[in-house]
Image (cartoon, grey):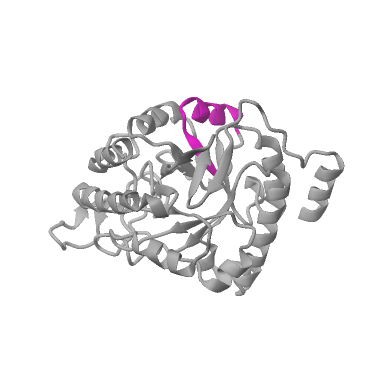
Amino acid sequence: MNILKKLLALIIFGLAITAHSNERDVITIKGNHLHINNEIYFMKGLCYHPVPKGETARSFYNLDQDLALMVEAGVNTIRVYEPIDDKEVLDKLDAAGIKVIISFGYNNPNTFDIATGGFIEYIQKYKDHNAILLWELGNEYNYHPEWFGGDINIWYKTLDIAAGLVQMIDESRPVSTAHGELPQDDVLAYGKNIDIWGVNVYRWDKPASILREWRIKNVKKPIYYAEAGADSYMATTQLGYFEGESQEAQADANRNILQAIIENKKHNAGVMLFQFTDGWWKAGNPDQHDKGGWAPNSGGVPYDGAPNEEWWGIVDIDRNKKLTFDVVKQAYTQN
């Protein structure tokens, strides 16, 4: 059954009409910001994909400790890379006062993807849950035209159609996408149904320049940092930081990044710092902490231009705080 047939079935049974709960927060967009219950909501967030040591799949086995650390750090939002199909997890997020951005992938039938229409089923199932802040479609797919037969416009057309379907099913929440870097005019022309644009930005420790470029485009839609940050491993010795693990480099970079974003919060809706915990599964043996790894358009990673993929956490795999934890805590609790 294709996406349109699924949507038609929902409409026939009257399920595509959003039922607003009296206990639900009211989420709206006004100007450059999200508002919750008519108050500005600036996202102070983290990307969250907790994969245990020695494994390759996400697990919430450590959720209670993770939430305690997030609350301590002043986090009010997390961004996940695949939907959370567990009401107990969503309930715990809500009880902790943490909202979640639910992101849908394109072609992964096991995770409520866009290609099979599974995202429709997920939204229908969870649209009344108070923990959910945004529906987000795709993560920097503009770097991967090979996933669409070499024609990235196929993705942009799909994105806009999918966003329109989401709005029909759940008109109570904004729809977003996470674009790699600044979307250009042709991309924006496709994305008419996107309510708020997420951007994954790695411009050394100076992320605010993208906000000036966004204002020049005069898009009239808010923008947020779907990813930003720095890892704690230096591929080379430079700028006073030594090769190898360097929590100092990560802390200094994240301090500058968060300061720049928060100082310009008049012009953006918030930030999802990448990320909560180190990911040992990404670059090699999941039983060990490897160096290396690669990510598209990542030459702007401070301070070595090398995205060592397993070293991005503000805590390590065992939940020990890195130096950058206190940097995040200061930025999120004092601003």
Q: Does the magenta stretch include residue 96?
A: yes
Seen at 25% across and 63% down, the residue is: 304
Residue 77 appears anywhere in the view: yes
Range drawn in magenta: 86-101
Q: Which residue lies furthest to the right in this view?
A: 12
Position of residue 25 relative to residue 183, above or below, is above
Q: Is residue 5 magenta?
A: no
Seen at 85% across and 39% down, the residue is: 13
Residue 106 x, y percent position in the rendering: 62, 57
* 238 left or right of 162 in image: left
Seen at 69% across and 43% down, the residue is: 170
Q: Nearer the viewer, residue 44 or 141?
A: 44
**Quadrant assignment, res 131:** top right
Residue 204 x, y percent position in the rendering: 29, 62
Position of residue 131 relative to residue 226, above or below, is above
Residue 57 appears anywhere in the view: no
Residue 321 x, y percent position in the rendering: 27, 36
Residue 85 x, y percent position in the rendering: 61, 36
Numbered marks: total: 0
Seen at 31% across and 35% down, the residue is: 333
**Quadrant assignment, res 3:** bottom right
Q: Residue furthest left?
A: 240
Position of the C terminus by quadrant: top left
